[in-house]
Amino acid sequence: MAMNGVPRLRVVRFVVVAGGLCAMAVCLGVLLMLVLRQAQAVEGDARHYLVRLAWVCLVMLLLTLLILLWVAGRFVLDLMRAQRPPEPTPYVDAWAEAGRRFRLEDHKDADPGEDAEAAAKR
């Protein structure tokens, strides 16, 4: 289910988000051009308000492009990470390690059937 090491869901998610951001950028760019053209033809307070609207559109357009750049960069970094094979985990024999760490206390007078607490009470 992977496409060159990247899950299909991640690719689909990237296409949907990037496509939505591109559509938003195009709409904001068109709106910015329309508002600026209309601001040239109008005088007075209406022009002042249209220029403010143009600034808002410009800021939103720049923010959209910044988010699009971040999404694309993150996708490319994920692609680069997916292409590198992971390092194999070293095999550790747990039983051998436990036997190496285990230290048996010497109780010369303890019965093999007694537990450690009973032997310690003596």
Image (tube, grey):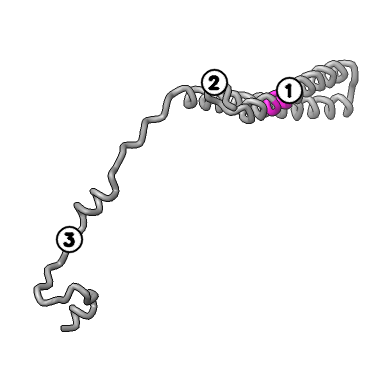
Residue 90 image offset from top left, x and y in percent: 31, 37
Tell me the element at label 1.
helix
Looking at the picture, which amino acid does disc 2 mark?
Asn
Q: Residues within 10 Å of mark 2 (few under 14, many from 20)?
A: few
Task: Name the residue that disc number 1 marks.
Answer: 25
Q: State which quadrant residue 108 falls in.
A: bottom left
Residue 72 image offset from top left, x and y in percent: 60, 24
- Left or right of 57 in this view: 118: left
Looking at the picture, which amino acid does disc 1 mark?
Ala
Distance in Å between CA atoms under marks 1 and 2: 30 Å
Q: Residue most toward the bottom?
A: 122
Q: State which quadrant residue 92 falls in.
A: top left
Task: Name the residue that disc number 2 marks.
Answer: 4
Quarter holding the C terminus is bottom left
Looking at the picture, which amino acid does disc 3 mark?
Arg
Is residue 62 among the parts visible in the rendering? no
18 in the magenta segment: yes
Decide which of 84, 28 is in the foreground and name it.
84
Tell me the element at label 3.
loop
Q: Which residues are magenta?
A: 16-21
Distance in Å between CA atoms under marks 1 and 3: 69 Å
- Which residue appears at 54% of the width and 22% of the height? 76
Task: Name the residue that disc number 3 marks.
Answer: 103
